[in-house]
Image (cartoon, rainbow, N blue to C red):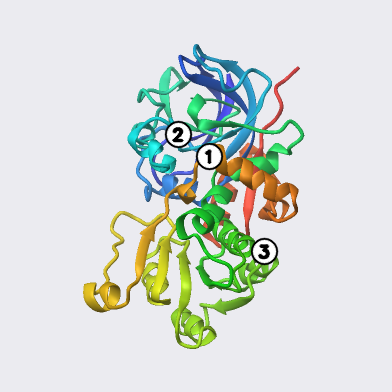
Amino acid sequence: MVRAAVLAALGRPLEIRDDVEVEDPRTGEVQVRIVASGVCHSDLSARDGVMLMPTPAVLGHEGAGVVEKVGDGVTAVQPGDPVLVSWVPQCGTCYLCERRQGHLCETATITLASGGLLDGTTRLRSGGAPLHQMAASGTFSELAVVPETGLVKLPADLDLKLASLLGCSVLTGVGAVLNTARVAEGDTVAVVGCGGVGLNVIQGARIAGAARIIAVDTNPAKLDLAASFGATHAVDASSTDAVAGVMKLTEQRGADVAFEVVGAQRTIDQAITMTRRGGHAVLVGVPAMDVTVSVPAFFGVVLAGKTISGCWYGSSNIRQDVPRLLRLYRAGRLDLEGLVSRTIDLSEVNEALEALGTGDLARSVIVHRPPAA
């Protein structure tokens, strides 16, 4: 039996249960003792029904831990290996993986819809009933069973509390810049929304060599934090129109690349509008199902020569991008420590989720209790 944070029904606080049973891994699966898990805005979206998933479920999808058991056929990792959990398992052989779009892996799609693993079933139970797990992960549990294709082996000396953030916010944010938008040296970038993922978009733009990085947020404290990650300018959208503020800073031209990292109708419209002619608007935030993109086809897209694209998981190939991010971290170019606002116990997860909804800075990271001797 292990502890886990369970979403029993949409819109309700998570229940901390200590009766969760974890089955042994099946063929192609790995049992991982989760050491740390970031509390991400997508967890809040899952709790509130913005992201649809079946309940009851163990939430959490941004985690790192140590392999305990491996199922038949597993060759990439072995017991004792430190690993990063990816919430998009990437098979490497499907149509999209072979076209270097592993973030859209066809075999991973079932996990989002089913709340289970690659076969659509789960390895978790509570009170004799099955528990779903978020995005083939369920990192709000002390033990998780995940697909082998959803793990990346990590260096033995890496702090797993910091490494856990690579699993979602860093891969998504930095990947949006380097993979999706391919920001070029000297570009002007606007980032609408400076939470955990937005901060990684900002430091991704700094790594890419953007000349101007304009942080846009309604929280002045987040704008201050954005500056420490590389933002060169700020627009306080609580007191200034976001689009007008960006236009003023860009000679009324607009940003070469604008990233929307909130997922709200208003901020999506703003990001598209503040993108210059011939520029690129990248939608990173997870919107509710009724949010739409509505742009005049001729004046807004054709005549403007503007590109509008979605960004899922930073367009990341986990086997290439995780090592690249680790090299950047080792070189002092990628800040992981600054992303952690506080370290918490699993019992504090509901407070951390509420803080996300009220403008919490950066990330709360759950550090699971070590197993009893």
Residue 135, quarter of the rendered image:
top left
Which residue is found at the position 63% from the left and 64% from the top?
206
In the rendered view, tell whether residue 259 sits above or below residue 178.
below
Q: For mark 3, what is the residue?
A: 229
Q: Position of residue 191 (x, y in %)?
A: 52, 68
Query: Which residue has dot 2 on it?
Result: 90
Total labels drawn: 3
Decide: marks 1, 3 in contact (CB < 8 A)?
A: no
Local crowd at mark 1 within 10 Å, few (<14), some, or many (≥20)?
Answer: many
- Tell me the SS state at disc 2: loop
Depth check, front residue: 160 or 345? 160
Name the mark on residue 247.
none
Check if mark 2's residue and mark 3's residue have beta carbons within 8 Å.
Answer: no
| Disc nearest the viewer among 2 and 3 | 2
Give the image location of residue 227, x and y in percent: 67, 70
Left or right of 121? Residue 248 is: right
Instruction: Specify whether 200 is left or right of 192.
Output: right
Contact, CB < 8 Å: mark 2 with mark 1?
yes
The amino acid sitting under disc 2 is: Gln
Q: Nearer the viewer, residue 18 or 372?
A: 372
SS class, disc 3:
helix
Q: Nearer the viewer, mark 1 or mark 3?
A: 1
Q: Is residue 207 above or below residue 92?
A: below
Q: Earlier in the sequence, mark 2 or mark 1?
A: 2
Q: Which mark is residue 318?
A: 1
